[in-house]
Amino acid sequence: MDIFDRLKAAAAADWTSYVEHDFVRQMGDGSLPEAAFRTYLVQDYLFLIQFARAYALATYKSRTLADMRAAKAGLATILDVEMELHVRLCERWGLSAAQLEATPEHRATVAYTRFVLDCGVSGDLLDLHVALAPCVVGYAEIADRLARVLGPALANHPYRDWIGEYAGGPYQKVAHDARHHLDALASRAMTEARFSELAALFGQAARLEADFWQMGLEGAQARR
Amino acid sequence: MDIFDRLKAAAAADWTSYVEHDFVRQMGDGSLPEAAFRTYLVQDYLFLIQFARAYALATYKSRTLADMRAAKAGLATILDVEMELHVRLCERWGLSAAQLEATPEHRATVAYTRFVLDCGVSGDLLDLHVALAPCVVGYAEIADRLARVLGPALANHPYRDWIGEYAGGPYQKVAHDARHHLDALASRAMTEARFSELAALFGQAARLEADFWQMGLEGAQARR
Amino acid sequence: MDIFDRLKAAAAADWTSYVEHDFVRQMGDGSLPEAAFRTYLVQDYLFLIQFARAYALATYKSRTLADMRAAKAGLATILDVEMELHVRLCERWGLSAAQLEATPEHRATVAYTRFVLDCGVSGDLLDLHVALAPCVVGYAEIADRLARVLGPALANHPYRDWIGEYAGGPYQKVAHDARHHLDALASRAMTEARFSELAALFGQAARLEADFWQMGLEGAQARR
Amino acid sequence: MDIFDRLKAAAAADWTSYVEHDFVRQMGDGSLPEAAFRTYLVQDYLFLIQFARAYALATYKSRTLADMRAAKAGLATILDVEMELHVRLCERWGLSAAQLEATPEHRATVAYTRFVLDCGVSGDLLDLHVALAPCVVGYAEIADRLARVLGPALANHPYRDWIGEYAGGPYQKVAHDARHHLDALASRAMTEARFSELAALFGQAARLEADFWQMGLEGAQARR
């Protein structure tokens, strides 16, 4: 049982509220209104800007060149790869990158991103990566599960781009490496006395992710 | 027109959504359910812990002894005075300080507090104090207005403690000084090119304050 | 063997270079030129401003009210007590507090203080307190040793104010509590994998303290 | 007169002590002992690790994607380009990158790098870039001057690698862009009230750069 599995087990109800949220279920069966997905995706673009800041923070807080280079790679993945998926998908709706960047942040976006950044500034690298893990590793878990259930039906699924991106090999590797890195950080810096505090951070982060899905669903209702 | 008035004017709709929120209106006419006030007050205790951190951050970021001593005084006011009001009020409901501190933070609490802290870490002292101002100065404005409307009726009002505390001389002076300090910081470090960004921070902070009142109202509904 | 003794043992040569530095020896036997002491004391005033920032940082990084209040007490001790000793001593030489604050920081002052602050920002509270310990606990150890050797001769000793302040009960208690707090932090957050890194921080901090004494000696030579 | 020229003029004596330091003069006429250059270059490698952290900090503190991408490019230049020059030069002396990274930091390295990082954490992006400028822009100025004086003699000069790297087109462009970026930051965020404080930061940074050269000269003496 690695540290990620321990954290999930310690925050089981919060974790389930996130990975089995109605938004995810509806995305999986294709019933998710496009307006919900669109609300989510635009905010997720703003979310990624803050997540890029979190990786820059990890670079700044690193004490070895190896850690710096690893964090810089995470920063580049977000700025150069992941955000491109969002820009590409949003262009279909006629939204430019500049329009995305100018959209006001929803409170759910503010809450999760600033919580993660604050964990990272006030704590150490382990705190920061524990707060990032529900997003980084959770997305890989969610997309992989949806892709397995869908099988070949994914090819014609309305959310095939999103599911395919996060279920695909490159992102699964990113998540696998992030999980491994988290375990290495925990081996180095986690005492049992810290575990309950880390589990509380992890649970709070998972709840804030669930709120982020909820924002998508409510965004769709608001437009009806 | 000092900087605070300029910021209010630039974010007028957000400001109104905060200072004239239903929670405020119901507190004023005494119709606010106790459950709503209680939900609010418990979260506000957690809020103040993070606000104390913001004043510690201001102390750390100060470049003169005078600024350090002023920020340290703000820190002491929160930890030694304002939190005592909350503990005293909560004791009536049988809630101890330890129970208050152990309550999970609501997302609205997380969103506003971590937003303020992030403004402060990523920006300068002016950014930090602009993000703090809706709370520090806004509470004085709200309570003063309620107290004036109530007049002598305040003495038997269900929320006389809260209104009295923030409308009272000592807190009005704290808010007055904070406003003056904000103006001094702006004189020193604000260019017109920064104003629109500061107004955006201020507006976001006011919206997050409105969400905080909303959390109180919804907390009451949830318990019915 | 508490964590402080373990750190001293792991950085023994650096520790000795600091606590048995010529500056300390000359202060003890009274042969230290006043110009050296004066150079030191003026820079130590600037040093304390930065150390106050370090305690403000510790307050900001705290995750419990108890930790916040403890760090705030440390901040108050520096700003309200320790700096007063310096102002009082410097007034004898006709130096006002304003003149002290306006003196340019020597490189040795910059090096130690910014190193400590960076340990604290980039690491966790344990890193910060390990970097502070050579100063906080080391001064108590140095002054206590000098006072014991001097015995009643301290009463007429040229450096009786400094030695008396740091060897006196109140400061000895501050140092004792700081050492106890460091041990508690280590019990909570120190793995053996971290120890060598913490010992490196501690050794670097002790070397930078030795450089600080050296600056005093060289300041005296420069004036001859 | 752009902001960089204004800062140089305001801190003229400090600037001259840096760009016309004996180390620079001896490097120019080829009389600099190799031991001095080696002492310098090894510490400069450690310096660059901290400077990479400063660019990561700038990325974290950015509020627009454009600023984030610019800061990330600066980070990549240091980690992927500039440090390679050092590794390549140090390999000639049989020093591996791992040995470089394991060398203890000299106090002069600690002083300058942590000063810059602290300016950046406690202030805003303008403070950070003002503190970085003596290094980023100053090296281009120094190397360009040496290269012009040497002319074709550079081809056989003992320090042709260093001079050629920093006098060459790619680095001159980096410095030119950095200077332009500093001016843009100043246009946006500099009031005249801030100028004297910024000039003080700039002067302190130039003095700490001069100390860094001095460390090289003293390193050579120590080995004789």
Image: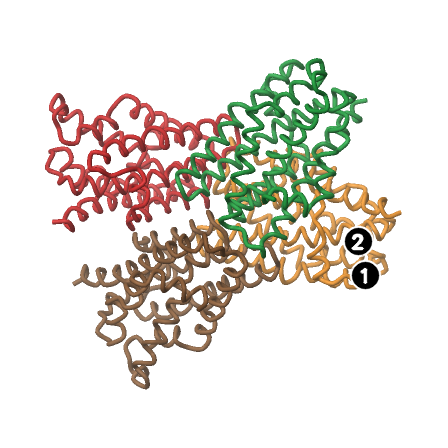
Chain colours: A orange, B green, C red, D brown
Mark 2 sits on what residue?
A38
Marks 2, 1 in one chain: yes
Q: Nearer the viewer, residue A138 or C124?
A: C124
Give the letter of the chain under mark 2: A
Question: Residue D53: in sight, yes or no?
Answer: no
Mark 2–mark 1 contact, CB under 8 Å?
Answer: yes
D195 on left or right of D89: right
Q: Nearer the viewer, residue B31 or A49?
A: B31
> What is the chain letter for disc 1?
A
Amino acid marked by disc 1: Trp
Query: Where is residue B64 shown, x and y percent of the image?
Result: 40, 42
Residue B58 placement, left or right of B157: left
Residue in the picture at 51% in, 36% down: B55
Q: Amino acid at mark 2?
A: Arg
- Disc 1 secondary structure class: loop
Q: Quadrant of the C terminus of chain D?
A: bottom left
Between the residue at mark 2 and the residue at mark 1, the CA separation in whole angstroms equals 9 Å
Mark 2: give few (<14), some (14-19) or many (20+) Cα within 10 Å: some
Q: Which residue is mark 1?
A: A93
Q: Is residue B145 left or right of residue A183?
A: right
Name the residue at the right extreme: A224
Q: Residues within 10 Å of mark 1 (few under 14, many from 20)?
A: few
Residue D60 against residue C190 in the figure, above or below: below
